[in-house]
Image (spheres, rainbow, N blue to C red):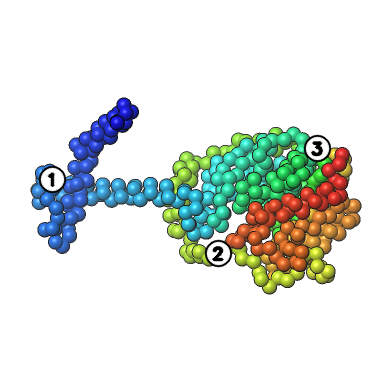
Amino acid sequence: MTTASGRHGLGLVATLEEIWWRSLLRRQLRLGFRLIRSALPDPDGLPVEDEPLPPLDETPLGIRLGLTALLVVLSVLVAIVVFEIVVRIPGVPIPRDLSTHLFQCYGPEDESSRVAFGSPELDMGLLKPDFDAGCGYNGYRWHHHTDHYGFRNPETWERTDVVLLGDSMIYGHGVEETQTAAHFMRERLGARVTNLAFMGDTTFEELAILSNFGLPLHPKVAIVYVFNNDLEDIEKGRDDPRIRRFIETGEAPEARLLPREEILRPGRNPPPSPWPVRLAQRFLSYRTLRYYLDQPEVSFAQGWHPFSAYPLLPSAPVPPPEPRGRDALALEYMRKAFSVMKERCDAAGTTLVIAHLPGLNEEDGYNDRLLYYHAQQIAADLGVPFLDAAGALVDDAGNRLRAARLVYDGHLTEFGHRRLADLTSDFLVSRGLLRR
């Protein structure tokens, strides 16, 4: 039996159907298709039309051209709509480089779509506070959400037990927040663990973030993870005169102590992008076209692949290599920055921990060996605990765990984050660092 709502629904469909059959648009489309069919070699086999249309030879040329243009425009519009819908479906296969171009949230043209902003007071990039975005890179998609202070945490805390500082490996590039080491540590320890890491952060960002955002949370422990590209990032972000001035005097923008809201003000009120940029950013079809037009060559095989020839662990008893180029100066900067961090942690009653997370993506292991040795030496000289986090990525025999890293860019998988969380949690418990 048909219900009242069902009868109303059928009536609406019938009404829409009647409008369609009587519409001028349908008639114009039929005429357009008739024109196209007339251009075929043998139109004699076409079905008999069920309603009279003006003879083709009596249709003015202007109308023919107009109808053809209309069909072309409608076809393009339909193709764009279908593309926009399909490409947004999770799991639809897209070339990795194109996927990164379409969905990366670190530096799109539209300012309002970026997850980060520039802090003039600290001369560095920070994450926008209270910000949500969909992110993608190398084919991996995740949701980005920040707390009131601009960090990737499920909620905003004014007090915490542990703060984690590092780069994209700790932030959780490529995975959801519930798949990060910070999340698993909260579960394992039953404590508040605040993630203060972000893509590309190195020692000068970590000094500023710990001082201005980490220590105001009154943590018991602050863990700073160093990674094998940290020296290169110091060298890119700070020139030699500024590095030397900081080493000699301790003066630098990243060493300033400022109110958090003052630091975050540019991130809360970013300048709007021009409206054409904002509009174009919304259309993936336009950005796809731009991508292929702007790049002379496109390689679908780009991406990170582990070096099978790298046999060494960072903790292996191998002499550290001699620093190359500006690396020696960057190491001195790192030593000075950790010294400042230690002083500020001591004053706040917080235990500073220096941790080394290896990259394992170099054939000669230069950066891993150099960073491991010097980070361990700095920790010993400052009298702070040192955590060798290589166990997150290798088994007890020293064999690399491929399941611990994302295939195409080497960041941690959920499995890798869980191993890092277990290793770090066991370290904190065994040292009694959470008792106070």
Mark 3 burial class by Cα count in 10 Å: few <14, some 14-19, many 20+: some
Q: Position of residue 96 (x, y in %)?
A: 52, 59
Identified at 74% across, 46% down, the residue is: 188
Which quadrant holds the N terminus? top left
Q: Are marks 3 and 2 in contact (CB under 8 Å)?
A: no
Mark 1 burial class by Cα count in 10 Å: few <14, some 14-19, many 20+: few
Judge left or right: residue 21 versus residue 8: left
Mark 2 burial class by Cα count in 10 Å: few <14, some 14-19, many 20+: few
Judging from the image, what secondary structure is the residue with disc 1 in? loop
Identified at 80% across, 37% down, the residue is: 218
Q: Which comes sooner in the sequence, label 1 or label 2?
A: 1
Q: Position of residue 309 (x, y in %)?
A: 68, 73
Q: Is residue 344 visible?
A: no
Number of marks present in the image shown:
3
In this rendered view, identify the residue nearer to me: 55 or 61. 55
Q: Which mark is residue 218?
A: 3
Q: Residue furthest front?
A: 1
Identified at 50% across, 64% down, the residue is: 300
The residue beneath circle 2 is: 302
Judging from the image, what secondary structure is the residue with disc 2 in? loop
Q: Amino acid at mark 1?
A: Asp
Q: Residue furthest top?
A: 4
Q: Position of residue 285 (x, y in %)?
A: 42, 50
Q: Which comes sooner in the sequence, label 3 or label 1?
A: 1
Judging from the image, what secondary structure is the residue with disc 3 in? loop
Q: Amino acid at mark 3?
A: His
Give how far apart the Cα atoms at labels 3 and 2 are. 43 Å
The residue beneath circle 1 is: 50
Q: Which mark is residue 400?
A: none
In this rendered view, identify the residue nearer to me: 169 or 70. 169
Q: Are marks 3 and 1 in contact (CB under 8 Å)?
A: no
